[in-house]
Every structure is written in structure tokens, then in C-alpha cells.
Image: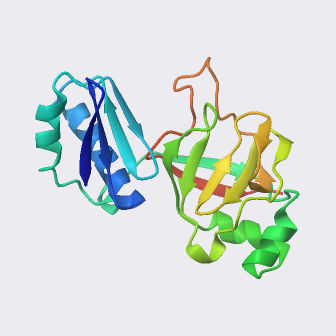
Amino acid sequence: MRVLEVGERALLVEFPDGAAAWAFHAEVLRRRAAGSLPPVRDVVPGARTVLLDGVDDPRALAAQVVRWTPEPLHARVEPLVELPVRYDGPDLAEVAALWGVAPEEVGRIHAGLEHRVAFCGFAPGFGYLTGLPERYQVPRRATPRTSVPAGSVAVAGPYTGVYPRSSPGGWRLIGATDAVLWDPGRDPVALLSPGVRVRFVVVP
């Protein structure tokens, strides 16, 4: 762990891998819920970092966090979101070839994995979901699409993502869901948030 002061009122906590960052993020939220965390305005997880912003005394908080021992992720039961998916994406055959399986096997394999939102970014409501073993990690498309339909389920590198709205994108599209990922009239607005477990359910 490396703790860096950022500006006058923020800390950036860096970790060697994503699992350590996610465990630390969960510990921050646990302490906040228990009332034992000093005032922090925003907690923003990244791939291997957690930003604590709006801190009254960054130096004092830095001295605390280095002594924390976060619980392992498997010891926590996070909320579960189920997303029904039609595995019929335009890149399904390419992904199947890269995985060395038949196209109809991609959905069964992908839906059978444990997924978790590591962090959010790119667009409101877009979560970077971990859970793809190394053998199922595929490169981004050489040429990104100028428009990816909302609800598209895609994979790239170690992540799965679901596009909350139509936007450009270079990930490989393996399916689609009708779930609404971002709804300003809903509480919570974002269906997926850091720490949430996601189960993909195969639908015809």
C-alpha cells in the first residue's frame, strides 16, 4: 500500500493489485457505515487505487489507514444484481473462437462465472466487472465502433461491461440486456456500483 496526499484535502491509496484495492474500498465503506471513519466527502475506487476526497486532515487519516487490516472479499456478502442477457452479440463468434469453444457455449460459460463491480467510469452507470479468468480474457477490437447500442454486454481484457446508453466503444459485444443501468428517476440511480455482485442469466 502507498498513501499519497493529493491537493489539500484528498488521499490517493495505491495497491499492487485490484483485489487489495477492492478489499480496502469495502473496509472504508464498512467504517463509514459504522461511524468510525473520519469525515470523507467522496470515496472513488479505481482499478488499483482508492481516492478519499474531502478529508479534513489527510495526514492524520493517512497514518490511520496504513494500520487497517481489511476483511478478505470472500468474508463479505455484497448485494447481488441479476441481469438477463441474450447472448447473440455481433462479436460472439469471434469471442468463441478466441476462447476455443462453440458460439453457443459462450453464454453458458460467461453466465456461470462470479462477477463483481470493481469500479465505475467511462459513462454514468458503466461498471467494470471482474470475474473473467485469464483464459477468457480477449483484446479490444482493433477498430472501435462509433455507436454501441444501450444494454450491450461486452468483454475486453479482464473485464465485462454493460453499456448504459448508446456510445462509441471498442469492447467485444457478446450479448444484450433490457435492464436499465442508469435512471435519474430511480434510487439508486445506478444499478451497478462498486462492490455489487452481478449474475448474468441466459435468456432466449
**Could you tell me which residue is drawn at 29 percent across and 49 percent down?**
24
Q: Quadrant of the N terminus?
A: bottom left
Q: Residue drawn at (60%, 58%), measured in percent from left and top? A: 159
Q: Is residue 145 left or right of residue 75?
A: right
For this orientation, the residue located farthest to the top is 185
| Residue visible at 65% across and 56% down in the picture | 200
Q: Taking 60 as reference, is 128 above or below it?
A: below
Q: Taking 199 as reference, is 56 above or below it? A: above
In this image, 19 relative to 127: left or right?
left
Q: Is residue 62 visible?
A: yes
**Image location of residue 131, percent across then percent down:** 54, 63
Identified at 65% across, 63% down, the residue is 111
Query: Residue 188's x, y, as percent?
Result: 52, 26
Q: Quadrant of residue 133?
A: bottom right
Q: Where does the image place residue 28, in percent across and percent down from the top left?
A: 27, 40
Q: Does residue 36 show up? A: no
- Where does the image place residue 12, in percent across and percent down from the top left? 32, 40
Left or right, 147 with reference to 4: right
Which of 36 and 146 lies nearest the eye of the viewer? 146
Indicate the quadrant where residue 71 lies. bottom left
Q: Where does the C terminus fall, quadrant-wise?
A: bottom right
Q: Residue furthest bottom?
A: 100
